[in-house]
Image (cartoon, rainbow, N blue to C red):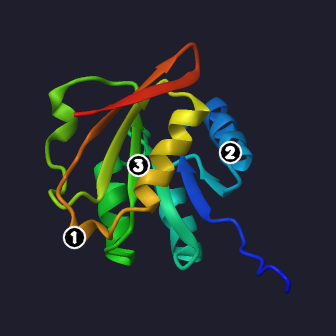
Amino acid sequence: MTAKFTPPKKILWVDDDRFYIKCGKKALELLRYDPLTAQSGWQAIKIYQEHKNEICLVILEMTIPDISWRNVYKELIQINPGLKVLVITGTKGSDLMLGLPQNGAVKFFTKPFTIHELSDKISSILEESPPSQQSSQPFWAVYHNNRLMGAINL
């Protein structure tokens, strides 16, 4: 009996900082995902359009300069209303939650966080029901010394 080969799941990591792109890509590879990367919101939308049937999650930095993360999110869910998005940020504050969809489609993760915390977060998101069947559960993420350190459930 031969085992069936399952290709790694594709995750799109969006960040304008090359350092975080490189770290995110390496982390996803170590976690056995197939990473795609984008350094702008518009590039992310283009890549998602090209790979929409393969990408299971978009990890989106909140402070990309060319287009707001909310507008990137809106464009992406027009392509795939069931898309799961993890927004990462080093910013703390209640203004993060303004204008968020109330269906659980967007999760937050605060920089810094460890690779283990990233792994747990991705696994929990991918194991969830489609966003339209959930309630909103935002998260904060934290970075420290350029390390992905942790997240807390609000």
Q: Amino acid at mark 2?
A: Lys
Tag shown at residue 86: 3
Q: Secondary structure at mark 3?
A: strand
Q: Residues within 10 Å of mark 1 (few under 14, many from 20)?
A: few
Question: Residue at left 73%, top 44%?
Answer: 30
Question: Residue at left 34%, top 58%?
Answer: 73
Question: Residue at left 57%, top 13%?
Answer: 145
Question: Residue at left 24%, top 57%?
Answer: 104
Residue closer to the observer: 121 or 55:
121
> Nearer the viewer's eye, disc 1 or disc 2?
1
Instruction: Say whether residue 76 is visible.
Output: yes
> Nearer the viewer's eye, disc 3 or disc 1?
1
The image shows residue 120 at horizontal and vertical percentages of: 50, 43
User: Circle 1 sits on which residue?
Assistant: 133
Question: Which badge, 3 or 2, is on the more N-terminal residue?
Answer: 2
Query: Which residue ends up furthest to the right in the rendered image?
Result: 2
**Count of marks overlaid on the render:** 3
**Apparent side of residue 75 relative to residue 27 in the rendered image (left or right):** left
Q: Secondary structure at mark 2?
A: helix
Question: Which badge, 1 or 2, is on the more N-terminal residue?
Answer: 2
Residue closer to the observer: 27 or 19:
27
Query: Which residue ends up furthest to the top in the rendered image?
Result: 145
**Apparent side of residue 108 relative to residue 142 in the rendered image (left or right):** left
User: Circle 2 sits on which residue?
Assistant: 25
